Amino acid sequence: MASELELDKALSELKRITGITLEVKAKTPEELELALTQVHCLCLAYKEKYNKNHFLQTLMTDGIPSYDIFERASRLHIDAEVPRVLFLVETKGPIDDTIMEVLKNLFPSQSKTYLVSMGERNLVILRPLKTSETPADIDRLAHMIVDTLNMEALTRVQTAYSGTVETLMDLSAAYRETSLALKVGKLFYSEQTIFPYNQLGIGRLIYQLPVTICENFLKEIFGGEVPRTFDEETTATINKFFQNNLNIAETSRQLHMHRNTLIYRLEQIERRTGLDIRRFEDAMTFKIATMVINYLQTERNS
Amino acid sequence: MASLSLKGIQKIYPNGFHAVKDFNLDIDDKEFIIFVGPSGCGKSTTLRMIAGLEDISGGTLEIDGKVMNDVEPKDRDIAMVFQNYALYPHMTVYDNMAFGLKLRKTPKDEIDKKVREAARILDLEKLLDRKPKALSGGQRQRVAMGRAIVRNPKVFLMDEPLSNLDAKLRVQMRIEISKLHENLGATIIYVTHDQTEAMTLGTRIVVMKDGVVQQVDTPQNLYNTPCNLFVAGFIGSPQMNFMDAVVKVNGEDVTLTVGEHVLKVPASKKKPLIDGGYDGKTVVLGIRPEDVHDSETFIANSPDSVIKSKIKVYELLGAEVFLYFDVEGTQMTARVNPRTTLRTGDDAVFALDMEKIHVFDKESELTIVN
């Protein structure tokens, strides 16, 4: 059953988006329910017709048929054929007024940049591309968004960005692409804050594989016993060995350990996993396998 | 202002990457601390943990004696200036500086007071009505600093704030930041990969590598008494010269042999080599470019530390000359007086100031003698 409070909330929402003040008096609960539905419908109809934010939101989530996109965009005075770039921002906590104000002022209305809320912690910045702008400029812009939100809104932010969105017809695909970049980035490159759609490396491949294929891959490599994790020392040794391009002398020097100690550790890993990571092929398999293990663990946890 | 304490701080990302390992540091009120190290050494991650922008995986962070591990960034009383700052393009300098305070609903007269005070400190008073487009790079940087200053925080956190400026402007801004520290009496933590910036700004420097603190000391001590080969090579420009040398102990005499050159170790530096049992072992000899001399008087007074080579490159920098040459296959640099007569291709004789040598263990890379 609808309550007076809900009706009041709906009326103030109507006032916020349309400027129209309505007074509704309902004598019975049924009338109240009916009034609430009608006010909701009014809000929705208004948003559909006049609200750019709602239009872009629906467009990105595939809610608008392609034949309708240009017409509705033109009604809302959105140029459908301007090349744009899409930044998907995710904040640690809910997006509050401070974050919105910082972004609104960073991209003032005359810059024709749209800020579209995509949930409690996600927001899309759809910005027109200037003809002179290069991929390096876009990357700088992404860093600028992250750093400014860090500095001004004092909040942790991660951002993914798309390639060029030529027309609004491509917006939905760009949003999907960027959402994927954000997910893959958080999973495989969690130490970073910016994830360009075209720099996801092998993480993108692994993420798109079905879980069963990943599990079979691990079984094929490790047999029945898939190592869950390695201890800190082993992980550090492996990471350093990979960083030094499988160079034993350099790795042992950097880890301040004797060459034979390093070789012993690598042999221990081979005994445990069956992979001799001194060989390029085994090292590559090992690297991919550890990424798959991490991916499956995260999938299970989520 | 504030003091900070970092005890056993760790950062392990969900993908297993161990970015910071057992970071321990006490920072006093009004200190200017620099985190320096090569890219990926964990310096920015540590700063971001202090800011609250990254979760702390282990250890304790205290600001003014209060544990801050789980406190939201906005409640830590900090202000940040990062590399990719942006000014609000349609606002004046005044509004740019006041914006953060307006968002926090600070009373107007208080905002005005704080903005004007920050503008005075930063020498921006005459530019308050200008828009960012009408400012130079250095002025914009000062506005970004101003936005942090008006918050009147306990701690300033700066992450490579000068990286996007050209070389000349960086030197100018370095001086400005140094003055700012003096004027504000603030606790500042500053991240840079540029050792010149670190040396000129910091009261203490934290040198990091692979997520591990290598040494924490004053700029002077880091330069004169590095604790290992990495610090010795990282601090100083041009960097310290390194050569492999074999230690020979003959009664009271200790020598270092580099190929055909035999260098006599002075009395003040012998003991650790004898006591450490380095006789017959290969060590790494380090000497700063300014301690390699080409003057005839110095060479005549130092017959036991002479090396000979051919000059490969002569570089005149105005007030000094860098001479590049090889000793036993290792490239060396000498920083000499511009009046030197040596030129590219000349056979040269140099003498090392053996009182200034550093000796490192080849295996552990730790300092044996400073």
Image (cartoon, rainbow, N blue to C red):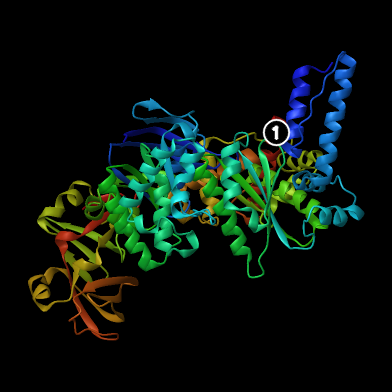
Q: Position of residue A140 (x, y in %)?
A: 56, 58
Residue sitting farthest toward the top: A28
Q: Nearer the viewer, residue B120 or B359?
A: B120
Q: Nearer the viewer, residue B35 or A233?
A: B35
Residue A155 occupies quadrant = top right
Question: Which chain is mark 1 on?
Answer: A
For the question of whether residue A284 can be seen, the reply is yes
Residue for badge 1: A225
- Residue occupying the point 49% across, 40% down: B102
Residue B356 lies, in percent from the top left, at: 17, 60
Q: Position of residue A10 (x, y in %)?
A: 77, 28
The quadrant in which residue B153 appears is top left
Q: In the displayed structure, does residue A251 sit left or right of residue B339? A: right
- Up the image or down, B156 lies above or below A34; here it is below
The amino acid pointed to by label 1 is Glu
User: Residue sitting at 11 percent across and 78 percent down?
Assistant: B296
